[in-house]
Structures are given as structure tokens and as C-alpha cells.
Image (cartoon, rainbow, N blue to C red):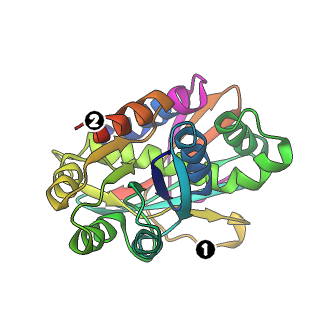
Amino acid sequence: MKKTCIIIDDASILRLRLRNILSLEYDVVAEGETGVDAVSLYAKFKPDFITLDITMAEMNGKEALKQIIEKYPEAKVVMVTAVGTPKNVLDCIGIGAVEFINKPFEENTVLTKIREVFAA
Amino acid sequence: MRQAIVNPFVSAAITTFAKDFGVKLERKSIKKKDAPIPTLPVSVSIGMTGKLRGSVIFSMSESMATSVAKALMPDAPMEEVRKFTPSAVGEMANVICGMVTVELAEVLPCDITPPTIISGALALNFLHAETICVVLQCEFGELEMNLAVVE
């Protein structure tokens, strides 16, 4: 059975691109466009992993990451963002993100990094 | 505005177009303006906060905006491409400005706001702010970057 995932990004075209890529190996069970969506969809579906943008309205990705990890410490959260500053990477890994993918990304990079999450 | 601030925006735009859209973007002109008023019909604004703050407003023709979206979804029918075009230009701006925050992280740590797509830009009022307007071009058309940011 395929592992399940949720995609969170405020850009619909990014969600579409990620869905096209992730669907090759995973079952995309839900999508959302805010940090609030991330927290509620994670609680509802409890997927094997969730991809999370950082710069979003309502609740940013770092806050959503914090709330998900507080409630589900075993959650596998993969940050996918254009704002891959050293501070953001360290902050997110410190909170509990398992991987960090910078935009713009290529299909192979996304799949390889997520395979590594489950190989670890 | 220092050249060291302008250059990261130009190189981020060139990298994004090469990597995400597969086209070569080149610098055409650069000039000073009194406000970041876009001159082309499709615009997207990103706010910058932190040690580099202000606004960056990108603008382009409708055909270029469609080409940007088409490059991201080459197999999709045009109706679908048009539906995703606002999101595509917003994401383009997000990626360019995001790359700038990474480039400047050590010297001018800053953050960006989510992109805002501007329709009917000429009807809006823009704050007076010294602006560097960089025009870049590629096979899709011209991309105007209005940089109204201060350290």
C-alpha cells in the first residue's frame, strides 16, 4: 500500500506540481493552502508525511509545524519553501521538520529527499 | 539603493527562469523611478520585512504571464493554464524574492510576505518611494522588477 501525504502551499500551481510529482509514489489524500489547513488536515488524516510551505497567510508554516509536532511528535513534516535561509532551516529542523526542500525544485530532488525520510 | 541589493534580485530572476521555465532571461535596462508603479498589465507584489524592507512589484504582459504558467504545466490544456496563471506569476515572484532572502541572509536578514496579484494596477495608488526599475527580457516577453526597498 502506498504511503499517504498531504500538500500545504498557498500557491495552487505549486500544489498541482507537487501532486503530480508525489502521486508517482505516494497517495495524496488532501491539500490545503494555509497553516490552519495544515493543522486540521493533519489531525483528520494523520498521513505518513506532510509537505509544508513557510510563507502563507493566516498561519505560516513554522507555526503550523510547531503545532503539529506538539500534538504529534512522530509526524514527518517536509518543508518546501523558497525562503530556505539558514535561520529558517535551523528553526524548522529544531522544531522537528525531517527534511527541507528549496524552491525551485526538480522532480527527482523531491522524490529522492522524501525516500530518504523513510530510509532513515 | 546599492548595486549589492539590486544584483541578487537580477540573478535570482535569471536563475528562476532558467531552472523553472527553461528560458534565458537577460537584463535589458535599469532606471530610477519615484514610485514602484508597474507599467505592464499583470502585476504581483511581494512585501519585504527585516533588514531589507519595502515592496517588490513585478509586472509583465498577459501573454508572458500565460507563458510562465504554460512552462510550469506544459501538458495542460490552455483553459487549465489560464486558470493557474495568477498562481504561477505569484509563485514566480515568491521564488525570486525567496532566493534573495537566502542570498542576503548573512548581511541583511529579511523575510517576505505572501504574493498579492494586482489587477488593474494603474487604478491603484502607490506610495512615493525611490524605486529601481530593472527590465529583463526572454522569449516570453519582458519582466519588469520595481524594487522599492530600503536597508
Where residue A112 sits in the image (x, y, percent)?
38, 31
Report the mark closest to the observer, 2 or 1.
2
Residue B2 in sight here: no
Residue for badge 1: B125
Asked if residue A49 lies in the magenta stretch, the reply is no
Find the magenta span and give its range: B17-40
Q: Nearer the viewer, residue B46 or B75?
A: B75
Spatial CA distance of label 2 from label 1 is: 53 Å
Q: Chain of mark 2?
A: A
Left or right of A99 on screen, residue B113: right
Residue sitting farthest toward the front:
A1
In terms of image quadrants, where is residue B8? top left
Q: Quadrant of the C terminus of chain A?
A: top left
| Magenta-span inclusion, residue B21 | yes
Identify the element where label 2 is drawn. Answer: helix
The residue that appears at 56% across and 49% down in the rendered structure is: A14
Residue tagged by mark 2?
Answer: A119
Identify which amino acid the numbered label 2 is placed on. Answer: Ala
Q: Position of residue B19 (x, y in %)?
A: 50, 28
